[in-house]
Each structure stands twice: as structure tokens, then as C-alpha cells.
Amino acid sequence: MAVVKAKGQITIIDQNDALSFQSFIGSNLPQTQIYSQDNNSYVPNWAASPYLVLTPQLFISGIPGDSMAIAGRIKAGSAQWRKNGTLLSNSADYAIQAAAPFALTVKKNDNAGGGNVKYEFSAILVDPNNGLETSFSAVISFNTVSNSGSGLLAIITADNGTIFQNDQIQTLTLTCDLFRASELLTANVGYTWGIRDLGVFAPTTAGASAATGQKNVTLPVWPMLWQAPR
């Protein structure tokens, strides 16, 4: 019978040198849609120009700017759009760009009558240095709020998105609108901006002092804000 005189060990590491990246979906319209039960109308109305346009964006560590349009980064034929898990294709209601930036144009009010709708973009990222392929996806959700003729609803929108994009988008602007049903109210309406948590975010983080009645505010950093119409 063999006798063990000595033993040793070695550790094997599987090193992953895949690209580090982030992806998200930009929208040209707010992620909240108002449905008026009184006249069966939507604000904004996705069925009319400029429609709802969703554009996926890809940011790779160490590479400045959006990398979605860089030739060879996205594997040919891998880009897909889904709505609530169902694969979409070009039709009268959906227009999908076959090449970068692979934007999806929605030409109907997809969440008719209220509720939520989710759009997902997926593709395969190719590392040109070693040919490694990495699957990724990004999701954006929209909700529809039903508003009766006498109800007041304040909607805050981020005019150029909610993500600081290095040298591309260095400031974010928020806008608040007050609606009665689907009617935008502009007369005798005042707005007051405020920081959600003064213990965390100082008021000086705003680009300028927000006076009573100011409808929008520009932020050079990322604090969460709330705004109340009055």
C-alpha cells in the first residue's frame, strides 16, 4: 500500500478580460403618459409625430462617448427589441433601425387605457481586440396615468435624460408641467423647487437659485429633486 510522503496544491484562476461597459435606453418623450378618460386622449400622443423614439446607448470603460455606433462593436444581426417580453419587428406600429444606433420608433399608444409597458433592447458586444462576445440588454419602462376632467396631475420630466454622460451631457434639466385631464395648465400656476433630503443634498447644488414660480432648474450634479405646483 502506497504511503503519502508529501502533498501540495496549486490554484488555477480563470481570468476574464471581457470589456467593462454600461448600457441604457434614451427616450425623446417622458416616461409618464397621461390618459384622459373624458376625451380618450393621450399626452404625449405616441401615435402622432414625433412619435416615441427609443435609442440604446453603450458606454465602454476607457472609450469616450457612445460606442453603439462604432463599427464592429455590435455583432451583425444580434440587435433585437422586445415589448413586455415579445419580440418586435418592423410594422406600421414599430420602426426598427437595422444599423446603429438601432433606434425603435413606436407609432401607437402601446399602453392603451393605462398601465405599464416595458421595452427591452438586447445585442451582442464584440471585443475587437480578442473577438470575445458578450450579450447585454437594457430596459426602459413607461406608465400611463388615468386622469379625470377635474383631477390635477403634476409631471416632472428630464429634458435631456437622467444620466450624466461625461463630456456629452454634463448638466441635467428638469421641467414640471401641471395637467387637468390632458390639458396643460399655464395660467395662474406657480412652481416651487426643492431638494428631497436637505440633510444629504445642499440647496447650493442647483445651477442657480430656484425662485417661486420657476418652472425648471438645471443641475450640474445628481441630487434627486421634488417639485410641487401650487
Image (tube, rainbow, N blue to C red):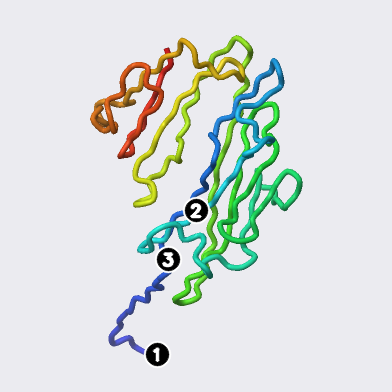
Circle 2 residues within 10 Å: few <14, some 14–19, many ≥20: many
Question: What's the CA distance linking mark 2 and mark 1?
Answer: 65 Å
Q: Residue at x 38, y 46 (%)?
A: 169
Front label number (2 vs 3)? 2
Amino acid type for the residue under numbered disc 2: Gln
Residue 192, picture quadrant: top left
Front label number (2 vs 1)? 2
Does dot 2 land on a helix, a strand or a loop?
strand
Residue receiving disc 2: 57
User: Which numbered disc, 2 or 3, marks the residue that appears first in the sequence?
Assistant: 3
Amino acid type for the residue under numbered disc 1: Met
Amino acid type for the residue under numbered disc 3: Leu
Does dot 1 land on a helix, a strand or a loop?
loop
User: Which numbered disc, 1 or 3, marks the residue that appears first in the sequence?
Assistant: 1
Where is residue 124 drawn, in percent x and y?
56, 64
Q: Is residue 189 left or right of residue 221?
A: right
The number of discs equals 3
Q: Is residue 193 above or below residue 200?
A: above
Residue receiving disc 1: 1
Where is residue 154 drawn, in percent x and y?
49, 20
